[in-house]
Amino acid sequence: MPDSLEILRRAFAMDGIGAPIARAGIAAIAMGESGLAPRTEASYAHTPNARIKAIFPSRLGHLGDDDLDRLKSDDAAFFDAVYGGMLGNHLVGDGYRYRGRGIIQLTGRGNYAALGRKLGVALEDNPDLANAEGAEAYVTREWQPDKVRARYDWLFTYDATAVEI
């Protein structure tokens, strides 16, 4: 089985992503999100509260330590608090069910559904498919919803050779 970096390289070739800075940028994002290993977002039960508040300030920053300790002891409640009511999550349990997966940590029912439609894969019905062998390639192809990907479009046109350091 090829490693994730090799699968990324194949996806880049398949999608015509040739600019080294774009490849490096996408790989760096995937590395930061998952270490280039497809996985499901882990529990935050043992994460220091200050770190959780730094990661999710608008959702959990207002909680006191006792309340946050109680919340993070229940993964389903924690992920619903973090992701509930956003990213297409509208049912109780969606935050947990559609937490981050894959090398880009695809998150949210709406994103799973949209990517699944584009790829012809039932990701919304079976979110764990985002971690399946070879999923790196198809998740990388559409690596974020269009509005988020637009934030990184400069990576596809940026000419790193023109910068003097």
Image (spheres, grey):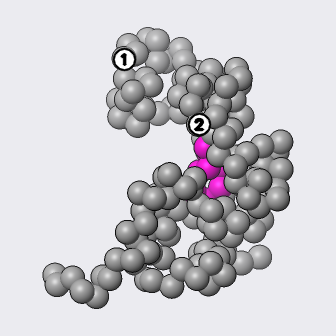
**Which of the 4 quarters of the picture holds residue 146?**
bottom right
Quarter containing the N terminus? bottom right
Residue type pointed to by label 2: Leu
Q: Please tell me which residue is depicted at 51% across the width and 85% down the height of the picture.
A: 18
Residue identified by numbered label 1: 62
On the image, the x and y values in percent for residue 108 come to 63, 39
Residue identified by numbered label 2: 87
Which residue lies most toward the bottom here? Answer: 161
Quarter containing the C terminus? bottom left
On the image, the x and y values in percent for residue 6 come to 63, 79
Q: Please tell me which residue is depicted at 30% across the width and 82% down the height of the picture.
A: 160
Q: Is residue 110 magenta?
A: no
| Residue 48 makes an appearance in the image | no
> Label for residue 45?
none
Q: Please tell me which residue is depicted at 46% across the width and 18% down the height of the picture.
A: 68
Q: What's the magenta bit mostly, secondary-structure-wise? A: loop
User: SS for tag 2?
Assistant: loop
Q: Is residue 97 above or below residue 37?
A: above
On the image, the x and y values in percent for residue 144 come to 56, 56
Q: Check if mark 1's residue and mark 2's residue have beta carbons within 8 Å.
A: no
User: Which region shows up in magenta?
Assistant: 100-107
Residue type pointed to by label 1: His
Which residue lies most toward the left here? Answer: 165
